[in-house]
Amino acid sequence: MGPPPQGLKPGQIKDPKIAALFSTKDPDARFDDLKEIGHGSFGAVFYAFDKERGETVAIKKMSYSGKQAAEKWVDVIKEVQFLTSLRHENIVEYRASFLKENTCWLVMEYCIGSAADLVDVLKKGLREVEIAAICHSTLSALSYLHSLGRIHRDVKAGNILLNDAGCVKLADFGSSSMVCPARTFIGTPFFMAPEVILAMDDGEYAERADIWSMGITAIELAERRPPLFNMNAMSALYHIAQNEPPTLAPVEDGSPSWSSAFVSFVGACLKKEPGERMTTAEAQQHAFVRSSFAPYVVVELIARTKRLVKELDNNQYRKMRKLMLLDE
Ligand code: ATP
Ligand code: MG
Ligand code: MG
């Protein structure tokens, strides 16, 4: 990322287009019953009730005070601008944003959790039909983004959310690029395409970097962890850039092996050379994901996961309680 615009102080808004992004009302007066459901580098995400619209929402609170406040402020504007400019059934829906006490409240539609949360609860990989349904919807979102000349750059199970109706929603545009091709070294190491890693020195990459990450995510959904997860991030980056692409691990004795369509899908996503990799359109047409998957596959997956959460002991339940907030 380049330096912040000259002389822009955190929270300071000169451009009327940017001012228009933020409501001037007090968010504390509008949102009630905040409960933390996730966190990241920026701060935390909360479950909340929107009294004005009478609905449950998610609020990502991003602070822009302290160290590197100016950079954080630029990131806040970028993420809000990015999300406000998107509208797609498989992208988390934007509601509003507010500024209060050096914190941005980014309000979105509420999802019950991410695909990574489900895998955590189930303690094993998902079934092929479930992985196919999640990939199918994620690819619709990516196709839309790519058609706008943008790159997500952080596709992984933790950024793929599910709502209670079984819809799959791509989220977390904090790392996304407005331009394609791009050159910035950004993303989550285990999921980064070789050309993104190599762009660190010199070079550029385009939207097919997201297709690589989609392939890694498919392995993550099947095996609970992305390949190389036991390595430290630096070694993993080196490994991805230098070695043959990863493949699905052979299944354990007794379990059915992966279908040839699934193996082929993963292989076609994980071509090291971007020119040999599937395009987004080709990925959408691949036999593994092509047939349309009714949301009931995901609805059933959510129901299966919730039944397991109910059986957890107190300590474990507290950690996964967020999946149950709409049922309490
Ligand atoms: P990362 O550190 O992975 O880059 P991040 O810090 O940028 O993530 P997000 O991925 O946007 O933050 O949100 C963090 C977590 O909060 C998500 O993984 C998810 O569990 C939860 N979350 C985010 N948005 C929502 C939402 N709309 N509904 C429900 N939960 C959400
Ligand atoms: Mg995230
Ligand atoms: Mg992020």
Image: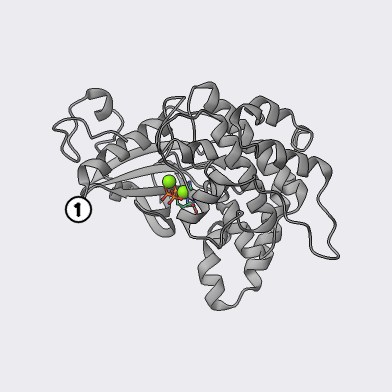
Up-down relation of residue 206 to residue 263 (above or below): above
Q: Quadrant of the N terminus?
A: top left
The amino acid type of the residue labelled 1 equals Gly
Q: Where on the picture, by quarter, is residue 230?
A: bottom right
Tell me where residue 156 appears, x and y as whole percent. 55, 47
Q: Is mark 1 within 8 Å of ligand 1?
A: no
Tell me where residue 171 appears, x and y as whole percent. 50, 42
Tell me where residue 260 appears, x and y as whole percent. 83, 43
Q: Mark 1 points at which residue?
A: 66
Q: Residue at x 34, y 49 (%)?
A: 61
Up-down relation of residue 216 to residue 198 (above or below): below
Q: In which quarter of the image is the C terminus?
A: bottom right
Tell me where residue 177 appears, x and y as whole percent. 42, 31
**SS for dot 1:** loop
In front of the other: 196 or 320: 196
Q: Where on the picture, by quarter, is residue 215?
A: top right
Residue 261 appears left or right of 314? right
Q: Which residue is drawn at 42% across and 33% down?
A: 83
Residue 83 appears left or right of 2? right
**Could you tell me if residue 90 is visible in this image?**
no
In front of the other: 276 or 102: 276
Q: Residue at x 33, y 45 (%)?
A: 105
Up-down relation of residue 289 to residue 33 (above or below): above
